[in-house]
Image (cartoon, grey):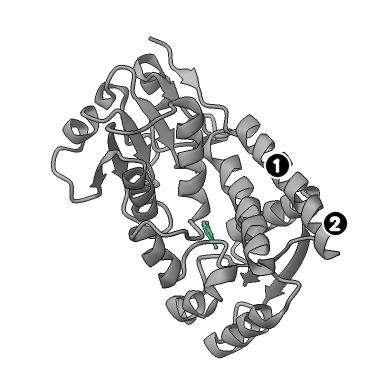
């Protein structure tokens, strides 16, 4: 079998267009476009690159972007004061504080200070709790993007065995909650899981989010399974070039899987599209 390629780039483009349409309608009604504030603390190069992509996509969708680049030495108190200002700003519908924050900053205090109604990352304990009991919530962008890909390419997920590899607050845990909400039988595997290949072999849906390049081998995948690869690590090749690799050995897995996301062009573009979607949703809810 050769797997169907799950086209995250095209799916993200569709979603971004939808957000642009909804955003334009919002602007007609309210006189302003939905606004997203992005906060970048310090110079961490991958974070700076992510923030550039987020700002670019925000503007391309016709939304308003508020960019706050502040020095690495910023204290927790100063950052909390900025979050307070953004919470109070009526032009700001969504607030994203790019992670990781410098070590001296109390990350949880900052994430918890964001108004839950503006929490487009879905990291606030209120949104985490709402998701866990099946209430309407702002949901973290990467797992939401994975769910949208599965719904498009697999359809009804009800009753399927899903294995999520990785238990991070940003991806693994919310992914498991979303799959549970979609009526999957869900297993969360992690670094202490015994016999990971055997656990993965029973999955109809595999979501790999561990950040270990090519950990998941083709021989672990059940024939016909859908494979969603959240990993994207730049790895130096023998010829000195650097290649972006996922958590799944793509060529091997594509031989057995029913459908699979490529890296790049799979989950990555969906994360940003879902951020814009969450901003539009937050704007609509705030304008009631
Ligand atoms: N750093 C890596 N992924 C994310 C994300 O989804 N949101 C934020 N705020 N920071 C991140």
Label disc, if present, on residue 54 of the rendered structure: none
In the image shown, does 252 or 126 lie closer to the viewer? 126
Which residue in the protein does label 1 denote?
18
The N terminus lies in which quarter of the figure?
A: top left
- Badge 2 crowding class, 10 Å Cα cut-off, few under 14, some 14 to 19, many 20 or more, is few
Which residue in the protein does label 2 denote?
28
Side of 147 where 26 appears, left or right: right
Side of 65 where 111 appears, left or right: left
- Badge 1 crowding class, 10 Å Cα cut-off, few under 14, some 14 to 19, many 20 or more, is some
Q: Callout 2: helix, strand or loop? A: helix
Q: For the point 73% across and 76% down, which residue is it?
A: 90
Q: Quadrant of residue 9?
A: top right
Can residue 237 be seen in this snapshot? Answer: no
| 68 w.r.t. 229: above or below | below
Q: Quadrant of residue 38?
A: bottom right
Q: x, y percentage for residue 210?
A: 36, 47
Q: Callout 1: helix, strand or loop? A: helix
| 258 w.r.t. 65: above or below | above
Can residue 149 be seen in this snapshot? Answer: yes
Q: x, y percentage for residue 117?
A: 56, 70
Residue at the farthest left position: 194
| 50 w.r.t. 153: above or below | below
Q: For the point 70% across and 47% down, which residue is it?
A: 19
- Disc 1 and disc 2: Cα gap in Å? 16 Å
Q: x, y percentage for residue 193?
A: 18, 46
**Foreground: disc 1 or disc 2:** 2
Q: Is mark 2 within 8 Å of ligand 1?
A: no
Q: Is mark 1 within 8 Å of ligand 1?
A: no
The C terminus lies in which quarter of the figure?
A: bottom right
Q: For the point 24% across and 50% down, which residue is it?
A: 191
């Amino acid at each position: 079998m050769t797997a169907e390629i799950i086209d995250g780039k095209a799916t993200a483009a569709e979603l971004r267009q939808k957000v642009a349409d909804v955003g334009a309608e919002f602007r007609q009604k309210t006189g302003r476009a939905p606004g997203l504030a992005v906060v970048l603390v310090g110079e961490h190069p991958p974070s700076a690159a992510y923030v550039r992509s987020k700002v670019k996509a925000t503007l391309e969708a016709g939304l308003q972007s508020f960019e706050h680049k502040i020095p690495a030495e910023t204290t927790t108190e100063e950052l909390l004061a900025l979050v307070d200002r953004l919470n109070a700003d009526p032009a700001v519908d969504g607030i994203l504080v790019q992670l990781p924050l410098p070590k001296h900053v109390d990350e949880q205090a900052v994430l918890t200070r964001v108004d839950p109604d503006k929490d487009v990352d879905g990291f606030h304990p209120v949104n985490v709790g709402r998701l866990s009991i099946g209430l309407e919530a702002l949901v973290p962008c990467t797992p939401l993007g994975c769910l949208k890909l599965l719904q498009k390419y697999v359809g009804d997920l009800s009753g399927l065995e899903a294995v999520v590899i990785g238990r991070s607050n940003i991806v693994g845990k919310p992914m498991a909650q979303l799959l549970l909400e979609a009526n999957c039988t869900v297993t969360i595997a992690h670094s202490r899981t015994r016999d990971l290949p055997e656990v993965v072999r029973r999955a109809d849906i595999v979501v790999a989010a561990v950040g270990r390049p090519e950990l998941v081998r083709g021989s672990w995948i059940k024939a016909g399974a859908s494979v969603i690869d959240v990993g994207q690590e730049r790895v130096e090749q023998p010829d000195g070039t650097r290649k972006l690799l996922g958590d799944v050995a793509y060529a091997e897995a594509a031989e057995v899987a029913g459908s699979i996301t490529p890296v790049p062009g799979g989950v990555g573009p969906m994360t940003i599209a879902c951020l814009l979607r969450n901003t539009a949703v937050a704007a609509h809810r705030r304008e009631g």
